[in-house]
Amino acid sequence: MTDSALQGLIEALRVLPGVGAKSAQRMAYHLLQHDRAGAAQLARALERAADGVGHCQRCHTFSEAALCALCADETRDAAQLCVVETPADQAALERTGSYRGCYYVLMGRISPLDGQGPRQIGVESLLARASDGVVREVILATNFTAEGEATAHVLTQALTARGLLVTRLARGVPAGSELEYVDLSTIAHALVARR
Amino acid sequence: MTDSALQGLIEALRVLPGVGAKSAQRMAYHLLQHDRAGAAQLARALERAADGVGHCQRCHTFSEAALCALCADETRDAAQLCVVETPADQAALERTGSYRGCYYVLMGRISPLDGQGPRQIGVESLLARASDGVVREVILATNFTAEGEATAHVLTQALTARGLLVTRLARGVPAGSELEYVDLSTIAHALVARR
């Protein structure tokens, strides 16, 4: 009833995060029944990205060129360096349109349980980047999760030891939210950091 | 911060059903960061399936060969023909291990709102298949949804007009369920069809 090319496709689709056996089957049937051109296009895009996309030398985000578009952009403020965990976080910051400095993308976070220590996330490389004599402020924008906070803590210690100004994104009540539904820890932080 | 191969991959991933902008981004980052070999493998599987997988001449399911493995299997009972909507439904029936006849896969269902009438799901072709002189019973195993029921109704009329014996999967209380939580329509059907 099924054959090897179809089974192979169903198996291969399971490399995608969040895709189990059922979803993979549904995706394979959908592509074969309704969108073979899309499947062929996806195959080309995967090949091109897997072969062509590397990491930016300066900020470590994904890039086809040695320097990513943002690092190559000379209108960005080289005195500010914002440290994020992932390219997705960087994209979220860029969408705000309110930051004009440079980035450093850790491509991970400190997570001892997963074997991710300071060495694995390249703290040395960040220290070298931040000590270029131009960067004056390092803005830590790791996530406000346990692991992101631990990462920020370790980075703060390493960076301040080098005499760099280190700041962290403000914690507080999210825009548009009602106090009644905001968690206690956030309100406590907002109260302490009131201005 | 992003470049065209990465953007192209994110766009291309959206051909997958149920994958929006956010999931596509997450998938692309995951593949590039953690599983480039898997991405390359997926590219090859997509290409192979898009080029190689066609439809079985007899039952219309996906197949690389002219006849699918099931239609080519001479130990199957050619006197029984089970009609299902999709290869996934066929796979579900096969997993029960309790059917040894042949299949006909509609690759769709009658759905006037989507422009799917009897012609689009190939009723003529099913009639030709069922009138081969060997098929004695046609088992309608379309889904028990409004569209599946409508499809079964249309097929019943067309097939009985040709003098074929037409049966439908039994409706009733699912195995392992408690009556208290079964919907009324199912209980009513089970009561009428009691044995």
Image: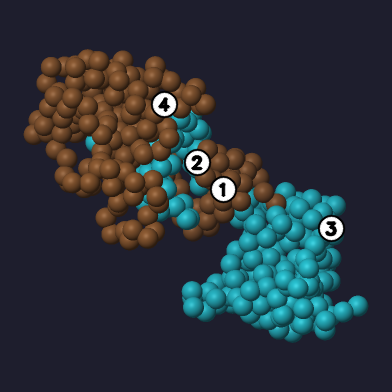
Chain colours: A brown, B cyan
Mark 2 and mark 3: span between their CA atoms? 33 Å
**Mark 2, residue position:** A16
Distance in Å between CA atoms under marks 2 and 4: 24 Å
Dots 2 and 4 on the same chain: yes
Element at label 4: loop
Q: Sequence order check: which comes first, mark 2 or mark 4?
A: 2
- Asked if the residues shown at circle 2 and circle 4 are in contact, with their CB atoms under 8 angstroms apart, the answer is no
Q: CA distance from mark 1 to mark 3?
A: 25 Å
Q: Which disc, if any, is residue A24?
A: 1
Amino acid type indicated by mark 2: Leu
Q: Nearer the viewer, residue B170 or A52?
A: B170
Give the Cα distance between marks 4 and 3: 52 Å
Residue B98 badge: 3
Q: Nearer the viewer, mark 2 or mark 4?
A: 4
Residue B101: numbered disc:
none
Q: Is residue B88 left or right of residue A114?
A: right
Q: Tell me whether circle 1 and circle 2 mark residues in contact (CB < 8 Å).
A: yes
Disc ID at residue A110: 4
| Residue drawn at (70%, 51%) of the image | A1
One can see residue B13 in this view: yes
